[in-house]
Image (cartoon, grey):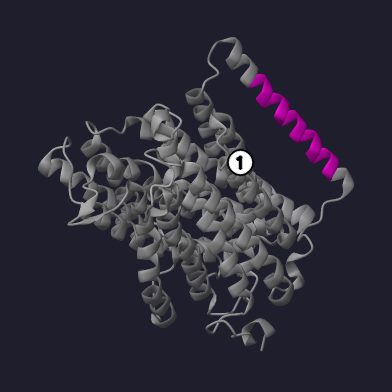
Amino acid sequence: MNNKNMDTAFFGQPRGLSTLFFTEMWERFSYYGMRAILLFYMYYAVTQGGLGMNQTTAASIMSIYGSLVYLATVAGGWLSDHLWGSRRTLFIGGVFIMLGHIVLALPAGTAALYISIALIVVGTGLLKPNVSNMVGGLYSEEDRRRDAGFSMFVFGINLGSAIAPILVPWAANGFGFHLFGSETNFHAGFSLAAIGMFFGLVQYYFGGEKYLSTDGILPNDPIDKADLLRIVKWIVICIAIIAAILGVMASMGQLNVDNVITLLTIVAIALPVYYFVAMLRSPKVNEIEHSRVKAYIPLFIAAAIFWGIEESGSVVLALFAEQRTILHIGSWHFSAANFQTLNPIFIMILTPFFVWLWEHWKNQPSAPGKFASGLIFAGFSYIWMAIPGMLFGTQGRVSPLWLVGSWLIVEIAEMLISPIGLSITTKLAPNAYRSQMMSLWFLADATGQAVNAQIVKLYSTNTEVAYFWAVGLVSVIFGVLMFFMVKRINGFMEGVR
């Protein structure tokens, strides 16, 4: 029996899963704690403790920020595969994330916001593909616990994500004691996010030494000095091109936040296209791996559509919570930021059921079938949000149960797509592109959020019903189409189940 199959110390899973479980839990605490209040920090008036940005611009920044975070996973996967290995790359990423939250905790205005964005983007790009790839490395190819293990890992992600939208807004509001006067002290909340990442780093450092294998210490595909110099040369050229583009925009008076966001959206869509072409043409990818990469393309598109809807929780649904939702049930009052906890809470409720389902359902659908079902559920979560506007108009406030229902529906979709996507990515990945294939999984999120950065500009109370209907129908229609493609996609997967 494979030694990996013999390790059952963590609820029947390998002991190393506990280290990665808690590392990612604290990283998600820091990230989603920050996201719970960041949109409000950007567009609240200065007198309310915010930056006083235009609401539409703030929403676009929020979406492109999320896109950049996952876009950076390409660099994180490459550095892991070719230079540092997964273990070191993950730790360095965590340090950058912690520094980013520390900067945001400083009352230094818009400058601190953009510096923080840069640091957290770099840090998450280094951390995210590697922690997930290391989970896959805990299991042999024939180990049936893999999907259940990834589901437990996703549970850890959402445990941190559930606590953060409660504690971070609480800290920003003076821990319930109005310590900061009448205005919200967002910086106190951001400080709590930094502390969370610190705990994650400490746990990873000591747990990793004991329970993680040595596989991630060295890169999978070390690069020689000649190739490294060539890569550095191309990086310098790319930086020069970007600088030139920004310079031309500045000379034409077009260097503004909206145009920079549009430029980044183009990059987020073009990069995965380039990546797929590079892998399909690579001599390091054999015939079987080539076929598996082809199978991954429709899964990637489906994931991008899903993440575009799911990630709207911190943007469009956050605006709906703030502006259109009754923020109390009886005498119980809550903040709009607290709704962000619904996402992870429903995942934690649903995870045990889906773990049991995948372990006991002998003739369960393949990954493409699960993705198709997930897209339909995701679409219905948006169509559901169109109903209150249709019934009661869009000028008043409605019951918070509409948001609760929407999050429940979309989290059913996430259980059909997210852990399955993580698992199938590790199965379909070519050996020379293991971490970089995981980067592609996160690029689906980047692409979805980049598109969001553009279409969120169309959202307002006046367009609310049409917005939710249009986006929801796109997801449902693609889900139906994907059901007809399941057999063909399975054929390209070449023996992977």
Residue found at the very far right of the displayed protein: 225
Question: Where residue 268 sits: x, y (%)?
Answer: 54, 38
Q: Which residue bears the numbered disc 1?
A: 103
Magenta stretch, residue numbers: 228-245
Left or right: where 27 falls relative to 407: right
**Can see residue 52?**
yes
Question: Where residue 396 sits: x, y (%)?
Answer: 16, 38
**Can see residue 297?**
no
**Which of these two is toward me, 60 or 278?**
60
Seen in the picture, residue 475 relative to 364 is either above or below; the reply is: above
| Quarter of the image with the N terminus in it | bottom right
The residue drawn where x is 52% and y is 57% is 28
114 falls in the magenta region? no
Question: Where residue 274 sits: x, y (%)?
Answer: 61, 41
The residue drawn where x is 55% and y is 18% is 255
The residue drawn where x is 30% and y is 48% is 477
Seen in the picture, residue 3 relative to 247 is either above or below; the reply is: below
The residue drawn where x is 17% and y is 57% is 330
**Which of these two is toward me, 231 or 496?**
231
Question: Where residue 150 sits: x, y (%)?
Answer: 52, 70
Which quadrant of the structure image shows residue 377? bottom left
